[in-house]
């Protein structure tokens, strides 16, 4: 598993890679985080749109259209960063949501 956190400018501020995780997962996690930040929505929403037939989304440059990227927002809805996980559809994917929930709790949401 890899976890990546970006600030509101898309800069990497945290990265954690478990031992023996494939190296490609580092770039994929950062790509998911960037996609969630750039489009201000979970990457799962984009994945679902493609699955629903919105194939034009496939032409969006640099977008990673796979579940695992989530925007981070303040209580008033301002996007201030993002978090992403790469876990190969492992049951641990819920940890990204747990990270967002913990962040919201820190902000008093």
Image (cartoon, helix red, strand yellow):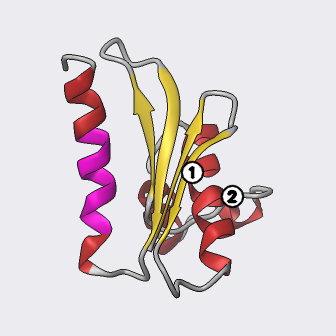
Quarter of the image with the C terminus is top left
Q: Residue 50, how many percent across, how many down?
A: 54, 68
Callout 2: SS: loop
Label 1: how many residues lie within 10 Å, few (<14), some (14-19) or many (20+)? Answer: many
Please give the range of residues in magenta. Answer: 93-101
Marks 1/2 in contact by CB < 8 Å: the verdict is no
| Residue 88 badge | none
Q: Residue 27, how many percent across, how many down?
A: 69, 67
Along the viewing direction, whichever of 58 and 28 lies nearer the viewer: 28
Residue 39, above or below 62: above
Residue at horizontal 49 percent and vertical 66 percent from the top: 47
Q: Count the marks: how many?
A: 2
Q: Earlier in the sequence, mark 1 or mark 2?
A: 1
Give the dominant element type of the magenta stretch: helix, strand or loop: helix
Residue 64 seen anywhere in this rendered image of the structure: yes
Q: Is residue 46 left or right of residue 99?
A: right
Residue 55 seen anywhere in this rendered image of the structure: no
Along the viewing direction, whichever of 51 and 101 lies nearer the viewer: 101
Cα distance, mark 1 to mark 2? 10 Å
Along the viewing direction, whichever of 81 and 48 lies nearer the viewer: 81
In magenta stretch: residue 96 = yes
Residue 74, above or below 24: above
Q: Residue 72, how many percent across, how many down?
A: 42, 34
Label 2: how many residues lie within 10 Å, few (<14), some (14-19) or many (20+)? Answer: some
Residue that badge 1 annotates = 33
Residue at horizontal 27 percent and vertical 72 percent from the top: 92
Callout 1: SS: helix
In magenta stretch: residue 69 = no
Residue 75, above or below 90: above
Residue that badge 2 annotates = 63
Residue at horizontal 69 percent and vertical 29 percent from the top: 9
């Amino acid at each position: 598993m890899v976890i990546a956190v970006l600030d509101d400018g898309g800069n990497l501020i945290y990265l954690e890679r478990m031992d023996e995780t494939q190296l490609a997962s580092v770039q994929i996690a950062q790509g998911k985080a960037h996609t969630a930040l750039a489009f201000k929505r979970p990457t799962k929403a984009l994945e679902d749109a493609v699955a629903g037939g919105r194939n034009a989304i496939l032409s969006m440059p640099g977008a990673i259209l796979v579940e695992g990227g989530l925007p981070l927002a303040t209580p008033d809805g301002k996007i201030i960063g993002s978090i992403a996980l790469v876990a190969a559809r492992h049951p641990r994917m819920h940890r990204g949501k747990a990270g967002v929930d913990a962040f919201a709790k820190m902000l008093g949401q």
